[in-house]
Image (cartoon, helix red, strand yellow):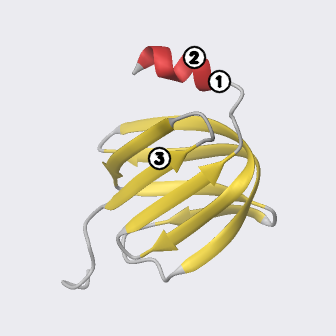
């Protein structure tokens, strides 16, 4: 692994109602309009339109999922910021956290 690459990503998921996720993760899978995109630390900069599906992110051995219904993602080598429509399970997830 290149020593200049970050070891994790800061994942931020924002909806019109609230901040859903703001944490360090190891990997993120994002539903784009053309299929799923896997994002690892050091990913090249990219601006992406989201499709309907699930954002999946991993921290250690734990994997979490978040349903989204479109939006946009800004991907940088050290962070991923996702602006999305209200997810189906937004109220369920906020009760869990």
Q: Residue at x 42, y 53 (%)?
A: 11
Q: Is there a contact, CB below 8 Å, between mark 2 and mark 1?
A: yes
Query: Along the line of sight, which residue is nearer the eye, 30 or 94?
Result: 94
Does 10 sit above or below residue 90? below
The residue indicated by pointer 2 is 92
Residue that mark 3 sits on: 57
Residue 79, disc = none
Residue at screen point 27% across, 79% down: 5
Q: Is residue 70 left or right of residue 11?
A: right
Q: Earlier in the sequence, mark 1 or mark 3?
A: 3
Depth check: 20 or 66 in front? 20
| Residue 18 % position (x, y) | 52, 35
- Compared with 46, 84 (above or below) is above
Q: Quadrant of the N terminus?
A: bottom left
Asked which secondary structure carries label 3, the reply is strand
Residue that appears at 81% across and 62% down: 33
Residue corresponding to mark 1: 89
* Residue drawn at x 33%, y 44% as measured from the top left: 59
Mark earlier in primary sequence (2, 3): 3
State the CA–CA distance, disc 2 to disc 3.
Answer: 18 Å
Tell me the CA gap for discs 1 and 3: 16 Å
Q: Quadrant of residue 51?
A: bottom right
- For the residues carrying marks 1 and 3, which lies nearer the camera in this image? 1
Dot 1: few (<14), some (14–19), or many (≥20) neighbours within 10 Å?
few
The mark closer to the camera, 2 or 3, is 2
Q: Secondary structure at mark 2?
A: helix
Mark 2 neighbour density, 10 Å: few (under 14) some (14–19) many (20 or more): few
Residue 21: x and y, percent?
A: 44, 41
Percent of width and height locating residue 14 = 54, 46
| CB within 8 Å, label 1 to label 3 | no
């Amino acid at each position: 692994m290149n020593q200049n690459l970050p070891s994790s990503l800061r994942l931020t998921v924002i909806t019109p109602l609230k901040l859903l996720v703001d944490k360090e993760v190891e990997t993120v899978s994002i539903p784009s309009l053309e299929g799923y995109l896997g994002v690892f630390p050091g990913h090249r900069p990219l601006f992406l339109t989201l499709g309907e599906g699930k954002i999946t992110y991993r921290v250690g051995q734990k994997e979490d999922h978040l349903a989204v219904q479109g939006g946009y993602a800004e991907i940088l080598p050290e962070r991923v910021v996702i602006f999305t429509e209200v997810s189906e399970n937004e109220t369920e997830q906020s009760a869990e956290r």
